[in-house]
Image: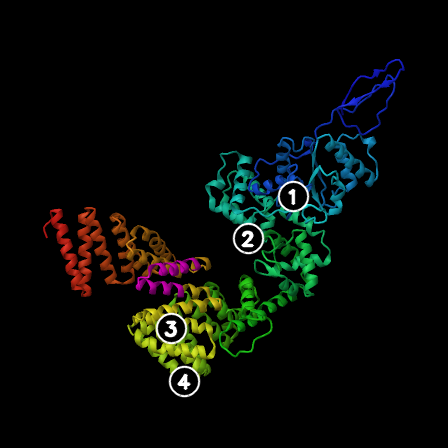
Amino acid sequence: MGQTEAAHEGAADGRVDNTISGGIFFHAVIQGRDITVQLPPQITPALSGLPAPSATFTGRDQDVDRLLKDLAPGESGTGAGQAVLVTAVSGLAGIGKTELAVQTAARARKKPGWFPGGVLFTDLSGYDPERRLSPERALEGLLHALGVPGDHIPNGLQDRQRLYRSVLAAYAEHQQRILVVIDNAFTAEQARPLLPTDGVTAALVTSRHTLDGLDARLHDLNVLAESASIAVLDQALRHARGDGDTRFADDPEAATRIARLCEGLPLALRIAAALLAAVPTRPAASLATALQAEHTRLDKLSRPDRAVRAAFDLSYRLLDGDHARLFRLLPLNPGPDLSTEAATHLAGTDTDRVEELLQHLADAHLVEPGRVWGRWRMHDLVRLFADEVGHARAADDGRDAALARLLDHYLTTAQAADIHLLTTPGLPLPDDFTDRDQALEWLDAEQRNLVAAATAAPVHHPAATGLALALGTFFDLRRHTNDWINLSTVAIAICREAGDRPNEKAALDGLGRALIRAGRFKEAVDTFTAVLDLCREAGDRHAEAVTLSNLGQALASLEKFVEAVNVLTDAADLFGDIGDSLGGARVLGILGPIQIKLGGSEHAVGYLTEVLAHWREVGDRHAESVTLDTLGLALIGACKFSEGVRAHTDAVALFREYGDPHGEAHALNNLGAALIQMRKFDEAADAVLGAARLSKEIGYPQCEAMALANFGQLLLQKRSFDKAVTPLTTAASLFREIGDRRSAASTLNLLGQALAEEGRFEEAADVGTQDALLCRELGDRHGEGIAWKNVGLSLCQVRRLDEAIEALSTAAGIFRETGDRRREAEVRVQAALARASNGRPN
């Protein structure tokens, strides 16, 4: 492994001088007269053992960069001049650990001066008991690759380890630093003897387990992002079939579905691409449809040489009894993740033991730690595999009993949390939670699990209906309206089937309140009418009064004010008869907005002030905040601006204290609108933009749109017409997306004004036409007339006179129909001027 200089005979004393240089030798070197040294043949560079990097590697740039930073000579995040000598990459089976290591090693090998000695690679096959390499056998292969003759390799582990590390140290001493890649290690014990100890040579280890016993820099490999997953599919198909195969590129929807079904697992993605490559005529949509069914997805994701199920099975078979049982039970949780507490109920054992089991499963990357400690999730494909093996061992695992324990846990804890959320003072509080904030935190964390549990629960289990009832207050607070409607609808059907009238009534009541939140007021009226029948059938006068209040609110939202007031009056009388002052206060709170809309703001101020005092007396902070916000509207309507602003400001603070961001955003928007009327534009902008930001953050598009519309109106009043266009355009789009056509029309009217003031008359005419058509759909003839008038005026400005005349004539006809003689006269004059300018007779 080097060159020999000729032996030189000495001077008169006959001394012999043998010099051997230019290499590293690991066998005996004999010195003497006339010696011929036979050196081993030239050693093939260690890099020759590295598998070829894939040509379709993507989505791992940050991972490669991080590993290269660790491998760089004399560089490390731990301190100047100190290199990271061992890096351990861990992750789920099929996630691409080997490919990442190979790609990183290949790039590192090309860096000048990084690894001039080359790269050693060994696959320990740690998860396949039949192919698993012992450290002794792995060392034998590595020593061969380093050029050590077979007859010089000792038999014992310690001797091989000692020689191996000496060889690596010798390479390092001669500036021939080597990178050792140890792939697919099962345990730290399997990999540790292969690690260099000279302080220079670097090692990169991969494993399905987190090998925290190697004193290594740990690197957990995550699934690919959706965009990278789609890129892998496309690149792999093109690599197999050539750039002309654009099936994934031509059908991005199918590519996205496949990427999501594979959930970013590179093994699954490459198998999916191979399935498509095998049949050139198969559309991508066909494969997406085939993978959609959960019960056959693992069957589909297989090829003769590889399969997702087989990869998972190797990890599963290495689990002991308790770990394997918990692994099989985890898919019973129907939601996307679960807490340690929930897993404890599944397993039917103590929390400490379950936490140990989960941590071990996480170390094996069969589960993943959540974003916060104490929560866990499974990759979707692992979940399917675990469920598959779980069904096969259902009797042994006590699967039905485990599910029942989990559902009981979710139901009883949700019921306890609901009591903490109720604002009625004086209720005894369960000790499941220390306070309301903790209960709300639990509900926020478990919301998706609770919804999934209610949906998946067997109809005979109380959770199938009980969760819908227990979660109503939370759903209302957080505006999870669709979940509320869906669970209530299912609960109603189950109760009717079982003949459970009391719970049917409770579920119908929840559905009605959810429909009001969703703006589906007509359906809410029908629902509360059905509830009313059940209340009267049962002779429940208190429930009847509450339902009349809810029905009145729904009717008021439909602007059927006379009917609403009659119903609310009946409710107030009933509450009075049974001596329920809280119920009476709620009725007055509903009457307030009706009175404001009917122009009786001054009168509304009086009894809303009375209601406010009542809520303060009983200590219901949330009812107080709602009433304060309504009182603010009444005060502004009564031209008591300073008092109105103070009421809205106090409402904002109370909503924030209570933890109701939706109420806070709404109150902020009302505050901003009041300040606009007072022409306090800077303060108003802070309020409405704050409302818009908060609404966007919490997913409250209705309030976001209202806030942006208010901001646009503010800018119009400041004559900042160019700046008003963007918020008004966004607000109009949001209103349309959520189906609020009336607000969309009024916002389009403002947008048309801004565009016309900017001289953008073509755009103003287009927006005005949209406004007119929306008003026609709504039956708003007056608004439609104003919109056509604005369209006509804008078209006159760009000399589209025939169209302008038509628009103005339409407006005139509508104003005549609605009895607005002043506006009719105005547009007739404008139409006459347009005809004259166009040379047409009047």
Of marks 1 and 3, the one in the foreground: 1
Whether residue 508 is visible here, answered yes or no, is: no
Q: Which mark is residue 553?
A: 3
Q: Position of residue 47 (x, y in %)?
A: 68, 32
Identity of the amino acid at label 4?
A: Gly
Q: Is residue 20 above or below residue 435?
A: above
Of marks 2 and 4, the one in the foreground: 4
| Residue at 44% in and 77% down | 615
Identity of the amino acid at label 1?
A: Gly
Q: Quadrant of residue 449?
A: bottom right
Of residue 307 and residue 28, the one placed in the foreground of this image is 28
Question: Does residue 29 appear to the left or right of 365 in the view shown?
Answer: right
| Residue at 41% in and 78% down | 613
- Give, as a single range, the part of the protein colored magenta: 667-694
Quarter of the image where the N terminus is located: top right
Identity of the amino acid at label 2?
A: Ala
Measured in 3D between alpha carbons, the distance from the residue under mark 4 to the one under mark 1, in whole angstroms, is 76 Å
What residue is pinned by disc 1? 79
Q: Is residue 137 above or below residue 112?
A: below
Of residue 766 and residue 487, the one placed in the foreground of this image is 766
- SS of the residue under disc 1: loop
